Amino acid sequence: ETGVTQTPRHLVMGMTNKKSLKCEQHLGHNAMYWYKQSAKKPLELMFVYSLEERVENNSVPSRFSPECPNSSHLFLHLHTLQPEDSALYLCASSQDKLAGVSEQYFGPGTRLTVT
Amino acid sequence: GENVEQHPSTLSVQEGDSAVIKCTYSDSASNYFPWYKQELGKRPQLIIDIRSNVGEKKDQRIAVTLNKTAKHFSLHITETQPEDSAVYFCAASSRASGGSYIPTFGRGTSLIVHP
């Protein structure tokens, strides 16, 4: 698969588990994003890594922890999640320049179920 | 921060009719306005975008208009076809303090085109 890939595609975890979601982009972009997609809030931005800056949505609980070791890889570390965290987690990338930003390319998502 | 309102939440049309989806935004500094289409079970994909220095853009049956003074932009789809059925998201991007572009998405419009 080219473009933006995500693993795993499906994940079921208990509330006491620790897991990580992985995203990789093969587009040479310099910005990566995590979104949560649920019926309540269709596309909620969680974290952004761009131009060596990390921006986060202040409403995201600390049980979600992002990591971006380089411009091609992005992780979302999960621990002690709650059932309301069940959702589709989408990764995206774009080319962010001081003169403007390009469209976002989304990955296929990880369907997370917290039991 | 930015706030994007999108209407309607559901739009049902007959094949061949036109469909219009409207969004308003609050941050006058926003300068990039993309529209994404998400088919059932698939990832969002860009269908058209507009930057703040342009008032209108057209691509075959799809057009977007932007009114910066009123802070609203609209998606127009003409001669709708059943394959246009999907959820459509608008977004407005503005710069964070460190220079990164931060997109804020609308809540989405579920478009249903009846054959």
Image (cartoon, helix red, strand yellow):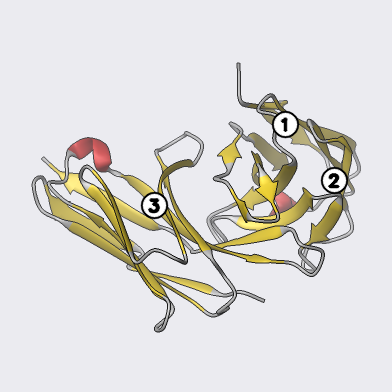
**Amino acid type of disc 1?**
Leu
Q: CA distance from mark 1 to mark 3?
A: 26 Å
The answer to whether residue B78 of the structure is visible from this angle is yes
Residue B108 locus on image (x, y percent): 43, 58
- Which element carries disc 3, helix, strand or loop? strand
Q: Is residue A93 left or right of residue A38?
A: right
Mark 3 crowd level (few <14, some 14–19, many ≥20, 10 Å Cα): many
Q: Is residue B41 above or below residue B2?
A: above
Q: Which chain letter goes with mark 1?
A: A
Disc 1 or disc 3, which is closer to the eye?
Answer: 3
Mark 2 crowd level (few <14, some 14–19, many ≥20, 10 Å Cα): some
Which disc, if any, is residue A15? 2
Q: Which chain letter goes with mark 3?
A: B
Which disc, if any, is residue A11? 1
Quarter of the image with the N terminus of chain A in it: top right
Q: Is residue B15 above or below residue A108?
A: below
Q: Nearer the viewer, residue A12 or A77?
A: A77
- Which element carries disc 2, helix, strand or loop? loop
Q: CA distance from mark 2 to mark 3?
A: 33 Å
Identified at 57% across, 46% down, the residue is A102
Identified at 61% across, 51% down, the residue is A101
- Which element carries disc 1, helix, strand or loop? strand
In terms of image quadrants, where is residue B89? bottom left
Residue B99 locus on image (x, y percent): 76, 62
Residue B54 locus on image (x, y percent): 39, 63
Which disc, if any, is residue B88? 3
Identified at 12% across, 46% down, the residue is B79
Labels 2 & 3 near each other (Cβ < 8 A): no
**Amino acid type of disc 3?**
Tyr
Q: Is residue A75 left or right of residue B7?
A: right
**Amino acid type of disc 2?**
Met
